[in-house]
Amino acid sequence: MPLVNMKDMLQHAYDHGYAVGAFDLVSLDFLEGILAAAERARAPVILSLAESHYEYFDFELMMPAVEAAAKRASVPVAIHLDHGASYESAVRAIKFGCNGVMVDASHTDFSENSCITQSVVETAHACGVPVEGELGYVPGVEGEDAERHPGEVTYTTLAEAKAYVERTSIDFLAISIGTVHGHMKGKPRLDYQRLKQINEALAIPLVIHGGSGLSDDQFRRLITNGITKINYYTALADVAGASIRANAKANRVSGYTGLVKEVKQAVSTEVEYRMRLWGSAGRAAEVLSRCRLWMPVEHLIIYNVEDVDETRVEIMMAEGR
């Protein structure tokens, strides 16, 4: 049952200088392809579900499949809510099995972002769930007409990053240093010096969004300077779409199942390449030995028990949380 504590997983990556991929899934083909790659590479992996993708699948129906697949894997797996839009979204994700959540209030001002994130942290930490916050603004379009981020990049500042982490007690920080969601126009210019300063000041796992389109060398430099979690979706959508178009163009098939037959392998090949590039390949056994297994407590039932006062009830509820 290698569904593991996500904070332990990313702390190991941070301490040992590699990055774990958080791959957004939108179907069972993506889910199976991502996990197959992790098994081949013997790499820890984060199965990521973005709230902006809920129009493509029913979250409450998808989660049992994701949990079952994670528990069946022989490599370390975490399940993460990506770009949760609100406190309610984060609580719902935890309720249905995510053992890591991101609340994205980066479009608001610093004070409101901190307030929203702090409220999520208080509830999530009571459940043992780590939280990712985002500071700065990563614009663009995530995937294919999915999550829209208009406007220009707002870079994360060192002063605000320090204040934000101190105020919210987040476990991981997603920062903005020049990437964009979706397809990039032109060559991305990343502010490595800014990243280096933030990493040295905070010493917590840092996260990059908008990873599709970066070069291999850019990824290596990001990881050297503290990036520990890399969110990755657009390139997966691209290779999946290309496999469908290739099947259609070749006139080999006409039905749905034939058209999507190669999607799983296309996604899996891309994911495995990234795992090996980012240094997580071959780490599974070591990570498993260092991570607490994730054992969700689903229900706490209090029934007619004599001499149970409000204080005792609260103690039992706290234990259940």
Image: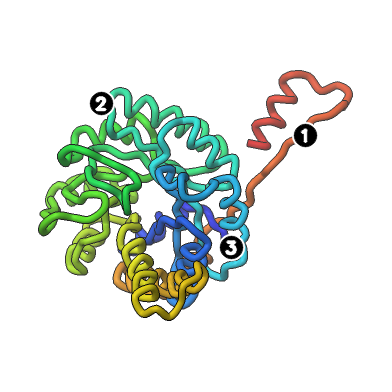
Q: Which mark is residue 147?
A: none
Q: Mark 3: which secondary structure?
A: helix
Q: Are marks 2 and 1 in contact (CB under 8 Å)?
A: no
Crowding at mark 1 (Cα within 10 Å: few <14, some 14-19, many 20+): few
Kindly identify which residue carries mark 2: 109
Residue 260 location, x and y as percent? 46, 69
N-term-proximal mark, 2 vs 3: 3
Colour convention: rainbow
Q: What distance separates the C-alpha of mark 2 from that of mark 1?
A: 41 Å
Residue 122 location, x and y as percent? 48, 31
Q: Residue at x 32, y 53 (%)?
A: 144
Kindly identify which residue carries mark 3: 69
Kindly identify which residue carries mark 1: 301
Q: Work out which quarter of the rendered image holds the C terminus and state it.
A: top right
Q: Mark 2: which secondary structure?
A: loop
Q: Residue at x 43, y 31 (%)?
A: 86
Task: Choose between 27 and 178: the one closer to the eye.
Answer: 27
Q: What distance separates the C-alpha of mark 3 from that of mark 1?
A: 28 Å
Residue 245 location, x and y as percent? 35, 70
Q: Residue at x 42, y 39 (%)?
A: 84
Crowding at mark 3 (Cα within 10 Å: few <14, some 14-19, many 20+): some
Query: Left of 241 or right of it: where is 140?
Result: left
Residue 272 visible in the shown view: no
**Residue 37 sits in which quadrant?**
bottom left
Q: Mark 1: which secondary structure?
A: loop
Single out the mark in the foreground, 2 or 1. Answer: 2
Query: Left of 307 or right of it: where is 319?
Result: left
Task: Choose between 298 and 188: the one closer to the eye.
Answer: 188
